[in-house]
Every structure is written in C-alpha cells, then in structure tokens.
C-alpha cells in the first residue's frame, strides 16, 4: 500500500485560502482487500476524528478556536488522508464565518463529498466544561483489564514481525494437551492494551494507540496470546482504520464471537487523532471518548 505525491513530502506549503480540493480520498478497499474478509462485516462502526487545532475568523476578522469531532461511517467507500485533512482545516483559518453552524455545515459538506457518505461534524468550545464532559472530550479510561503485563512472568523474547500474525492468537498449550477449547457457556471479556503500534503508509512515521476489545465467545481468551498478536503490528504499514479492521477480522475468525467490539484511540499527529471502532452489531457501538495520550 503506497501513496505518492505531495502528501508524502517532508515540507508542504499550507494554504491560506479555503481549499476543499486538498482533501484526498483513499479507498477503504485498499485495506480490506488485504484483509481478505467479508467486506460487509467491516462496515458496521464509525471512525471518530478529533481536531484540536480548529480555527477560523469571525466577521470582525478575529480568530476563533474550537475542538472538532468528525464522525465518518465505516460504510463509506473512502477515508480521508490525515495530512490532507490538516491542510484543508488550515485553509479555513483565514475564512470568515458569521456563525459556528456555518463552519460545521461547510466541513460536513466537504468531508461528505470526499468520503462519499454523510459525515457528522461537531464543534466544542474550550471553556464549555459541561459540554465537553457530555461530549466525551474530558480524559477517560478504557474499560476492562489492561493486558500489557501479560508476558511479565515469561522468559520468552517477543520477536519483531514484518506483518500482523493472527496465528499468535492460537493457544498452543490447550490445543496440544487435547483439552477442549469450547465452553458450554460463552463468556464476556473486556480488555485493552496501550502498546498498539503501526506505521503510516504515506510517511512511514510510527502511529501509537490504545486498543480496546469487548468480546463474548465460547473459546478461552488468552491475554498473553492477545498481547503477542497486538505486538505483531509494530512494523506493519497500515492506516488506523485498516489496522482496527484487521484486528476485528482476525478476532472474528479465531474466536467466532457472538458479540465483538474493537476500537482504538490513536495519539495525535498534526493536531488530529483518529479513533476507529468496529462492532458486530450497531447496538454495541460505544460513545466517543478521549484518553490521556490524546
């Protein structure tokens, strides 16, 4: 997966006039074809983008600032390349708007045209403490058990993988012992890891994130194996959305869950963080939130 041109250059001229043409769409099929799983199973969910360098002018020419959240449905045929979104948002910095709703309407129109689906846009004031609490912009904590120390008592050295390795999910000890890996009663598991890392396919820069999973399955979930699998993404070149969809597909294949939610909170770059979430049922979709590293 590679993209060439201005988006991969080290230096870029930032537009000072409204420039919707800078938005660069990327087909979701680029990542989903690699995953090789049923596309319709990956279209239930949303990608939340949070922009912390949002600014424009009022009719007096005074700069206005806000925090923005964009909701891109997982069913959209395209995503937007993050650097192109930063260029686009910067192009609004010196554009005058009489009301905040005009800013929201314009961005929603342009992003929806780019990804060819309806994008939601919300703007939040910096001093609106109650509003920010309700919107999930105050610092939250992932639910469940942190599995980052699952290998602390092991003597093994975890190897670097070039690509994600779903075979690491297999519980070799249980399988070789001849014990059944199926339980009569499906069990719910909720856990997270702060060790998700991958590389941007455009710039090759590292992307760090926190991954959270809620899964109900009749197979035992081994935290050490899950951690090994997450660590196998460390040298993988993939967009945030593709990485989450890969994890969703691999967990679905191996655990055959009756319910599954996979989400990630990626750290900010260029004033923007990306937070994809995929669910087996739309009713499992959580609320957007923000973690301490964002």
Image (spheres, grey):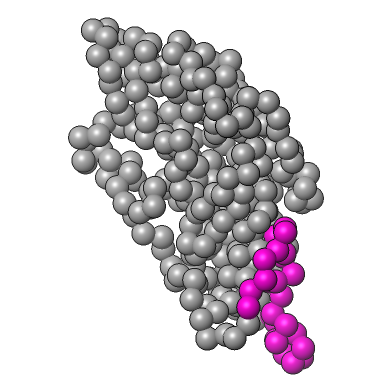
Determine the residue located farthest toward the top in the rendered image.
59
Question: Residue 48: x percent and y percent?
Answer: 48, 40
Viewer-proximal residue, 225 or 175?
225
Determine the residue located farthest toward the bottom in the rendered image.
177
Visible in this render: residue 14? yes
Q: Above or below — where is 60 with respect to 141?
A: above
Q: Above or below — where is 80 with respect to 229?
A: above
Q: Above or below — where is 180 with respect to 198?
A: below
Viewer-proximal residue, 146 or 272?
272
On screen, residue 90 versus residue 131, left or right, reads right
Question: What residue is drawn where x is 57% and y is 56%?
Answer: 197
Visible in this render: residue 277? no
- The N terminus lies in which quarter of the figure? top right
Question: What residue is drawn where x is 63% and y is 25%?
Answer: 6
Q: Which contiguous range is marked in magenta?
A: 157-182
Q: Above or below — where is 176 with respect to 186?
A: below
Question: Residue 204: x percent and y percent?
Answer: 63, 44
* Residue 245 belongs to the span the image colors magenta: no
**Which image quadrant is residue 171 in?**
bottom right
Viewer-proximal residue, 56 or 76?
56
Question: Residue 104: x percent and y percent?
Answer: 40, 21
Predominant secondary structure, magenta span: loop
Viewer-proximal residue, 161 or 9?
9
């Amino acid at each position: 997966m590679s993209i060439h041109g201005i988006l991969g250059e080290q230096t870029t001229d930032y537009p000072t006039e409204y420039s919707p043409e800078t938005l660069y769409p990327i087909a979701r099929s680029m990542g989903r074809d690699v995953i090789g799983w049923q596309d319709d199973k990956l279209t239930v969910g949303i990608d939340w983008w949070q922009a912390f360098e949002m600014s424009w002018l009022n009719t007096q020419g005074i700069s206005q600032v806000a925090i923005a959240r964009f909701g891109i449905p997982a069913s959209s045929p395209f995503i937007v390349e993050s650097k192109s979104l930063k260029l686009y948002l910067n192009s609004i910095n010196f554009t005058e708007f009489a009301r905040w709703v005009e800013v929201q309407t314009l961005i929603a129109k342009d992003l929806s045209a780019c990804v060819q689906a309806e994008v939601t846009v919300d703007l939040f004031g910096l001093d609106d403490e109650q509003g920010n609490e309700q919107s999930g912009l105050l610092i939250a904590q992932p639910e469940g058990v942190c599995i980052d120390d699952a290998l602390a008592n092991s003597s093994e050295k975890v190897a670097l993988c070039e690509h994600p390795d779903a075979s690491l999910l297999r519980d070799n000890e249980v399988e070789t012992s001849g014990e059944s890996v199926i339980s009569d009663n499906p069990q719910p598991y909720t856990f997270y890891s702060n060790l998700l890392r991958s590389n941007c396919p455009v710039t090759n820069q590292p992307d760090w994130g926190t991954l959270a999973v809620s899964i109900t399955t009749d197979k035992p979930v081994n935290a050490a194996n899950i951690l090994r699998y997450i660590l196998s993404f460390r040298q993988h070149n993939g967009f945030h959305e593709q990485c989450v969809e890969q994890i969703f597909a691999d967990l679905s294949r191996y655990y055959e869950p009756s319910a599954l939610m996979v989400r990630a909170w990626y750290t900010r770059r260029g004033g923007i963080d990306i937070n994809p979430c995929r669910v087996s049922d739309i009713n499992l979709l959580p609320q957007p939130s923000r973690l301490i590293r964002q």
